[in-house]
Image (cartoon, grey):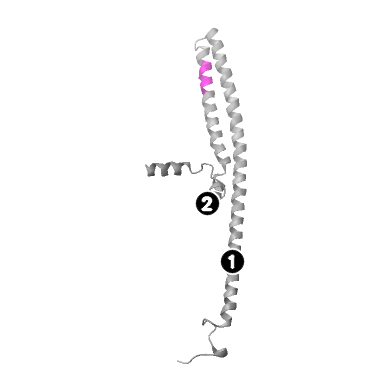
Amino acid sequence: MTEESGPERDPETPGTPGDLLGAFRDVGAAGRSGFAAAKHVGEALRALVAADIALARSALGRALAFTAVAIVFGVSAWLLLMAALVAVLGAAMQWSWPLALSVVALANVAVTAWAGWRAISYFEHTRMKATRRQLAQLGIGDGDGDNEGVADGDEAARS
């Protein structure tokens, strides 16, 4: 075994001046790749927030539309129920007015309940749950109770 020296020495062998320069290059390359990865994470988070805001905006419009339907049918149901009360005080035909108006009023109440349920389900999209989950994973924000089911399960597991 002979000791290698001079320019014939392997640059991968520890202790050579090329190793320190190579290590600095490796650290610089790792820093650049880390910065690029952080940049991609930021772009992905920005895209998530933009998509979540677009979903919330769309859901808000739909929720308002179904709320309007619920209000219209709720008012008409109220008016029909009042008409049934007036008809009870009035005269009746073969099929009584109160019965006919009550059937229509109950149909309106059913549509009102359906539209209200749909409005509530669309309002859930305005909470931006996906963005909150991602921000919570990054340690930003308090989560605002998004993990309520998880917390309840944890409490049940402890007891």
Q: Image quadrant for the N terminus?
A: bottom left
Q: Residue at x 60, y 26 (%)?
A: 71
- Residue type beneath disc 1: Ser
Give the CA distance from mark 2 to mark 1: 22 Å
What's the magenta region?
Answer: 100-107
User: x, y (%) of residue 24?
Assistant: 59, 74
Residue reaching furthest bottom? 2
What kind of element bears circle 1? Answer: helix
Q: Which residue is mark 2?
A: 137
Quick one: label 2 or label 1, which is nearer the N terminus?
Answer: 1
Q: Residue at x 53, y 36 (%)?
A: 121
Determine which of the numbered discs, if any, sits on residue 33 in the image: 1
User: x, y (%) of residue 139?
Assistant: 54, 51
Residue reaching furthest front? 15
Q: Tell me if residue 36 comes above or below residue 137 in the rendering.
A: below
Nearer to me, 54 or 106:
54
Q: Image quadrant for the C terminus?
A: top left
Mark 1 neighbour density, 10 Å: few (under 14) some (14–19) many (20 or more): few
Foreground mark, 2 or 1, reads 2
Magenta stretch: helix, strand or loop mostly: helix
Nearer to me, 97 or 72:
72
Q: Residue at x 53, y 24 (%)?
A: 109
What kind of element bears circle 2? Answer: helix
Q: Tell me if residue 12 comes above or below residue 65 in the rendering.
A: below
Q: Tell me if residue 53 comes above or below residue 99 in the rendering.
A: below
Mark 2 neighbour density, 10 Å: few (under 14) some (14–19) many (20 or more): few
Residue 90, by quadrant, is top right
- Tell me whether the residue at label 2 lies in contact with that at label 1, contact meaning CB atoms closer than 8 angstroms: no
Left or right of 4 in this view: 31:
right
- Residue type beneath disc 2: Gln
* Magenta residue check for 101: yes
User: x, y (%) of residue 34?
Assistant: 58, 64
